[in-house]
């Protein structure tokens, strides 16, 4: 008895469409009449769209379907596509690498975004708006400090960190007073406590209904 295993079949070009779509496209390639070939290809494209409804959220999703059909056909199919025929090289291009900052974080609990914000503010001309944004950044940094260190922090430490993160280009008036920030208490078992309270209330109701003492 001969078994038909997937490992013995032709490799799927796009597994998300399944083997049936690949067989349909291979069949369309064998149709000699061009008009009938185009008509059958339109039907296959419709089925491909129904199998992948998430593509409808993509701009020009039908263009994407036709490109996928060419890819499944190994770019060896003669049909009248409403879109330009894609080149095989376009699918072999490697994505461009995203540059990643190599410089180490000066202060971990503030994150790189805060460094970028402070350096951007340092480049802005002096104005009341700039000072308001620096104060807002200082208040956020104070919250982050307490959140990650679970300890109190003085305004002087925040002001010193601002000067450090901005490479000395931003200095804050030491007379400025930031609002106090306290670390929020951690309650890992709060959900379990709520469940215990609910169960306790149910037990009291059950005892009362049974004639027991509440």
Image (cartoon, helix red, strand yellow):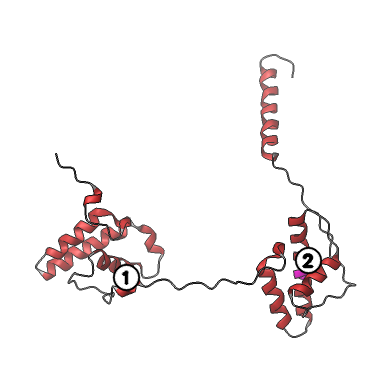
Magenta part of the chain = 136-140
Residue at left offset 67%, top offset 36%: 192
Label 1, residues with CA under 10 Å away: few <14, some 14-19, many ≥20: some
Label 2, residues with CA under 10 Å away: few <14, some 14-19, many ≥20: some
Picture layout, residue 113 above or below residue 201: below
Viewer-side residue, 199 vs 183: 183
The C terminus - image quarter: top right
Precedes in sequence: disc 2 or disc 1: 1
Snapshot quadrant of residue 196: top right
Picture layout, residue 14 above or below residue 136: above
Residue at left offset 74%, top offset 16%: 213
In the picture, measured across the screen, residue 99 lies left or right of residue 205, that is left
Please state the horizontal and vertical placement of residue 203, each as a whole percent of the image: 68, 23
Q: Is residue 138 magenta?
A: yes
Viewer-side residue, 186 vs 49: 186
The N terminus - image quarter: top left
**Picture disc at residue 63:** 1
């Amino acid at each position: 008895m001969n078994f038909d295993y997937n490992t013995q079949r032709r490799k799927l070009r796009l597994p998300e469409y399944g083997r049936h779509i690949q067989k349909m496209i291979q069949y369309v390639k064998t149709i000699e009449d061009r008009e009938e070939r185009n008509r059958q290809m339109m039907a296959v494209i419709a089925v491909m769209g129904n199998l992948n409804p998430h593509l409808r959220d993509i701009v020009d999703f039908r263009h994407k379907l036709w490109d996928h059909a060419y890819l499944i056909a190994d770019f060896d199919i003669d049909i009248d596509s409403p879109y330009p025929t894609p080149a095989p090289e376009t699918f072999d291009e490697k994505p461009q690498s995203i540059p990643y900052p190599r410089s180490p974080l000066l202060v971990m609990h503030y994150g790189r975004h805060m460094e970028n914000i402070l350096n951007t503010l340092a480049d802005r001309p002096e104005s009341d708006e700039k000072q308001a944004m620096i104060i807002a950044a200082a208040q956020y940094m104070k919250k982050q400090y307490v959140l990650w260190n679970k300890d109190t922090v003085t305004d002087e430490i925040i002001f010193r960190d601002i000067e450090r993160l901005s490479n000395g280009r931003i200095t804050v008036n030491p007379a400025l007073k930031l609002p106090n920030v306290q670390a929020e208490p951690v309650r890992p078992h709060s959900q379990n406590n709520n469940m215990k309270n609910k169960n306790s209330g149910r037990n009291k109701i059950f005892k009362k209904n049974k004639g027991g003492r509440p």
